[in-house]
Image (cartoon, helix red, strand yellow):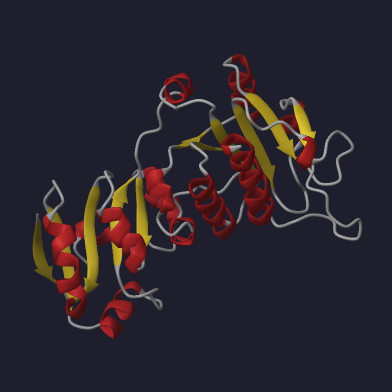
Amino acid sequence: MFHLEPITSLERPELSPYRTLRRPREHRERGLFVAEGDKVVHRLLASSLEVLSVLLPEPRLAEYVPALQNRPEQIPVYCVTERGALEALVGFSLFQGVMAIARIPPAPPLPRLLSGLPRPRLVVAADGLTSAENIGVLVRNCVAFGAQALVAGETCASPYLRRAVRNSMGAVFALPVIEVGNLGRTLAELRELGVRCLAAHPHTQQQALPAANLRADLCLVFGAEGHGISPGVMAACDAAVAIPIAATVDSLNVASAAAVFLYEARRQRQA
């Protein structure tokens, strides 16, 4: 269900999220996020998340009608006559010219989340990832390789930032996300609930990835390239595990490292 509303400006109060695309803090305070691009918006409309509105050029409307008609809520669809006019309204060049506003889903308490996950559980935690692009690709890797949830620490960019949602290609709609105020404390809680926490740490002397047992309930912890995992978060982990790489390379990009770890976890569990 939807109702069509032609527009020529973004001055109406209900359009304020589209006027403030460069001010993500305002979106977070209102519990909103922005989906941008064809695949991302289509995946949002196919998800169970609450969609608040869609903004698109009028020539693109027909291809979205079936997905809009299948939604349970009444969605306002704001149309402008052509893409150039839409980019002029929002103030910068758009990615594929289609956007939507949706509500960030409430995060379940950690014990409840874990109790609903099939075993062996596989959770990912992120510490200090300030790049929205990196956190978005990490989310996509999580869904691709079967991780069941993401815990984003207090120093981590939100997986619901516009660029993070876009780089996840909408995978964030299929992954439970918990944003926490103290990642070290959350890891301690996971350990109390029977989940082993392993830090992905380059050049560690503790254990190389091929020798690590990733078959039990597990949380893989990833830090930023360069600084890595913070000392407090590292201390909250059971052990550190490294991908064997050349000594001349300091570390891998976090998205690349996560893909290797998650692939290995999936390989071991399928075996």
Q: Is residue 55 above or below residue 153?
A: below
Q: Name which quarter of the figure residue 106 lies in.
A: top left
Q: Residue furthest front?
A: 271
Q: Is residue 136 above or below residue 109?
A: below
The x and y percentages for residue 216 are 62, 25
The foreground one among 186 and 69 is: 69
Of the 4 image quadrants, the one containing the N terminus is: bottom left
The x and y percentages for residue 29 are 39, 44
Q: Residue furthest top?
A: 192
Question: Residue, x 47% and y 56% (percent of image)?
Answer: 168
Q: Is residue 69 above or below residue 10?
A: above
Question: Residue, x 50% and y 50% (percent of image)?
Answer: 144
- Asked whether residue 46 is in view, the answer is yes
Q: Name which quarter of the figure residue 132 lies in.
A: bottom right
The x and y percentages for residue 197 are 67, 28
The x and y percentages for residue 158 are 50, 47
- Asked whether residue 153 is in view, the answer is no
Left or right relative to 161: residue 173: left
Left or right relative to 167: residue 236: right
The foreground one among 257 and 103 is: 257
Of the 4 image quadrants, the one containing the C terminus is: top right
Q: Is residue 192 above or below residue 129?
A: above
Left or right relative to 87: residue 185: right
Disc count in the image? 0
